[in-house]
Amino acid sequence: MVWCVLSGVARGAVAVEKAPEVLVGAYYFSGWWEGEGDKYQMSGQDWRERYPGRMATLGAYNDQRTMDREIVAAADHGVNFFQFLWYFQGNNLKAPNLDKLNAGVNFFSSSPENGRMKFTVEYVNTRPFGIFDEKQWEGACREWCAFMKHASYLHVDGKAIFKVHSVEALRQQVGGDEKAAARLGKLRAIAKEEGVGELLISGGVLTAALPAAEGVEAYDFLTTYMDVPALHKKQDPYPYSELLAMAEGAWKRFGEKSTKPYVPYVPAGWDPRPWRDARPSFSGPDDREWLGALLEVRKVMDRYPDKLGVPAGKDRLQKMILIYAWNEFGEGGYIAPTQADGVMKLSVIQKVFGNQ
């Protein structure tokens, strides 16, 4: 499994750095900018006035200085990569500053600190960001491949990691599983043409039931961004244990019966009240609960080594988790340092995964 590439070695030699036992990733949302349309605003009011504990201490906005600090903090605490949400900018969308939703991956690519960790791209294809035109799909593929050529892009077994946010959305947008597979085939062909090589493509799924095998055949492995129990909304948040129980059920279900390898997601919280979301809220984990969540996912991965992880060669998986999320402050899922939590969540990650 190739983890790092050429680095200070003799001509013709390849330095291969041993990968961590468990690759720890965190989803990254670039919705925080200063100006019209930023996600701190709800009906013209900054929701941080009501939720000051969620204020980020490394920088409130997605800019270069914030990214530089975030890379250092993440890398120093056992986070191996950011998975950046990428949004298609076509479809004549009228909301202001939507291009800034892709700023994070560009700041990472330009950061002097980016050698400290890896990154990947996740194509968010839910409404209104789907790509319907084939020429636009080809253009997006080439843009993604440009990121994959970056020295810090995440490869496993020499293959670049990429994710389609929603298997179901892609199926609906192109008109069925065969056409979705053709789209992914086009991406793979362009990656080879661009010199990227082979890919490992992940498909995003929800967790209530396992997807039909024929619907995910074109993907190399499956993941989940986030899923929420179908409980009625009430004024006070439900306990974190109920949110985690849903994730734990998914780890075991996919570990036992999935037709494709599955990378477990670990929810760092879910409380979207600042955004007035209609779904229920859950309390964020304290340090004991967060430690328990990370220890449990590690235990479950050990129990299902042939199902939970990323393909890494013949009959072998690389263990990996994806944490929801680095900075979903509006939805209540974050491990980035904040005024209320400080570096608690990062410190626990360091304790469990930092010395691999």
Image: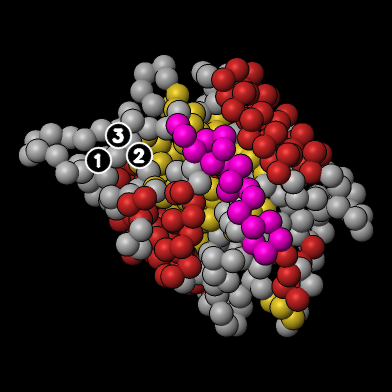
Secondary structure at badge 2 equals strand
The amino acid type of the residue labelled 2 equals His
To which quarter of the image does residue 189 belong? top left
Q: Is residue 190 above or below residue 297?
A: below
Label 2 sits on residue: 155
Assess whether residue 350 is covered by the magenta stretch. Answer: yes
Camera sees residue 193: no
Boundaries of the magenta span: 338-356
Residue drawn at (44%, 70%) of the image: 65
The amino acid type of the residue labelled 1 equals Val
The amino acid type of the residue labelled 3 equals Glu
Point out the image quarter for the C terminus: top left
Residue 327 location, x and y as percent? Answer: 59, 58
Residue 201 location, x and y as percent? Answer: 44, 39
Label 3 sits on residue: 17
- Label 3 Cα neighbours within 10 Å, binned few <14 / some 14-19 / many ≥20: few
Q: Is residue 95 above or below residue 79?
A: below
Residue drawn at (73%, 29%) of the image: 249
Assess whether residue 218 is covered by the magenta stretch. Answer: no
Camera sees residue 4: yes
Mark 3 or mark 1, earlier in chain? 1
Residue drawn at (21%, 35%) of the image: 15
Relative to the observer, which residue lies in front, 311 or 79?
79
Residue 206 location, x and y as percent? Answer: 67, 40
Q: Nearer the viewer, mark 3 or mark 1?
A: 3
- Drawn side of residue 253 relative to residue 65, left or right: right
